[in-house]
Image (cartoon, rainbow, N blue to C red):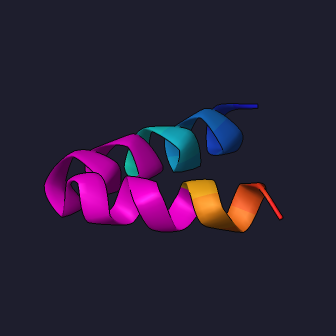
Amino acid sequence: AVRLAHSVKKEMIFAMVGGDKTKYIRLRRITP
């Protein structure tokens, strides 16, 4: 559980650093 939370935290940080570009790519990957 701790590991999962850690990875989620990492992803959130990466999203903040990457900006909208990363968010856009993630959204496209999630939605077909």
Please state which of residues 26 and 16 is positioned toward the viewer in this rendering. 26
Q: In the rendered image, which quarter is residue 30 located in? A: bottom right
At a point 63% along the width and 64% down the height, the residue shown is: 28
Q: In the rendered image, which quarter is residue 3 located in? A: top right
Q: Is residue 16 above or below residue 27?
A: above
Which quadrant: the N terminus?
Answer: top right
At a point 38% along the width and 41% down the height, the residue shown is: 12
Q: Which secondary structure type mostly characterizes the magenta part of the structure? A: helix
At a point 26% along the width and 53% down the height, the residue shown is: 20
Please state which of residues 15 and 30 is positioned toward the viewer in this rendering. 30
Q: Going by the image, does 1 lie left or right of 18?
A: right
Q: In the rendered image, which quarter is residue 32 located in? A: bottom right
Q: Going by the image, does 18 lie left or right of 23?
A: left
Q: Tell me where the magenta segment starts and ends, as one range.
A: 11-26
Q: Residue furthest front?
A: 32
The picture places residue 18, in percent across and down from the top left corner, at: 22, 62
In magenta stretch: residue 18: yes
